[in-house]
Amino acid sequence: MAKEATTDVQKAETASVPTAPEQTRTGPVYSPAVDIFENDNSITLLADMPGVKASDLEIDLRENVLTLAGRVTTPGNAKESNVLREYRPGTFFRQFTLSETIDQPKIDAQLTDGVLRLELPKVEKARPRQITVRAA
Amino acid sequence: MLVRRVWPSRPTFESSFSDFDQVRREMLRLLDASTGDGAPDQVAGVFPPMNITQDDDNFYLRAEIPGIKPTELSISALRNRVAISGKREIPREHERVSYHRKERPEGAFNRSVTLPMEVDAERVDARYTDGILTLTLPKAEQAKPRQIAVRS
């Protein structure tokens, strides 16, 4: 039997964040890995949150702080005993400060296969106003 | 609360040290039980991280593999070995975008684990929901311990 083949993709170190207010639930809190990119119209955020159901995910944006919080319920039945344990289900939590002004009502969030895709459209720039000078 | 998921990397291939490994694992498990909390048994830095549990009839293997197409997963089981391999691809964004962060891992992965007893490879069930792959591996009939009634 061949030895374990080389693993090309490495699980990133999921160091957790010191969360500002502590969670009421016990258990570990993980910082999800994210990709963030922007174009002229919007900022897009992708976050890996395996095991989180759409109903257990909270997204909050207030005062330019974006908060992602996802809860994972431990799967399985009570009779199961551990054989190998490499991860512990916990809470995903991460916050970002956004410098751009976001058009809040148009925010779109999709959760597919444990990956969150969050589209944050930027507010349209205020149109330059024409100021007519009145003759005195 | 500060938690790191990082533990010394120890791949689980078969070797002459597997007995030692078993002892070490068992000790860690007891340590876990005594503190009530405890960190994961093994490995991090390996993708995907997996948990294996068992009850009387089955082994359950759960692996965190977010955002993959089930068709890109390859799973095989033979006797007491299970192998999972696949490729995680993050689709390119078409438009011109500038990245602020790029943390999500991508690439190929390949892992195999040895279970403590043989499984019925024909009846293995695989499901993929919310980014977690769950394999239900029924223990082979001939490998199950038999209850022996004592006659008086």
Image: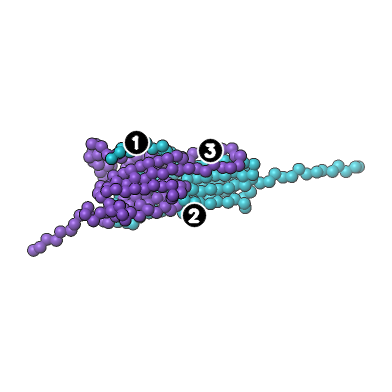
Chain colours: A cyan, B purple
* Mark 1 to mark 3 CA distance (whole Å): 27 Å
The residue tagged 1 is B8
Q: How many residues crowd around disc 1 within 10 Å: few (fewer than 14), some, or many (20 or more)?
A: few
Report the number of discs: 3
Q: Which residue sits at x=27%, y=52%?
A: B119
**Does dot 2 land on a helix, a strand or a loop?**
strand
Q: How many residues crowd around disc 3 within 10 Å: few (fewer than 14), some, or many (20 or more)?
A: few
Q: As shown in the figure, which amino acid type bears the numbered disc 1? A: Pro
Q: Which of the chains bears the disc numbered 3?
A: B
Q: Quadrant of residue B3?
A: top left
The residue tagged 3 is B101
Q: Which residue sits at x=56%, y=42%?
A: B93
Q: Which residue sits at x=62%, y=44%?
A: A42
Q: Quadrant of residue B150?
A: bottom left
Indicate left or right for B21 with A93 as reference: left
Q: As shown in the figure, which amino acid type bears the numbered disc 3? A: Arg
* Mark 2 to mark 1 CA distance (whole Å): 33 Å
Residue B134, how many percent across, how many down? 37, 52
* Mark 2 to mark 3 CA distance (whole Å): 24 Å
Nearest the viewer among B108 and A31 is: B108
Residue A127, how many percent across, how many down? 74, 45
- The circle drawn on residue A89 is none
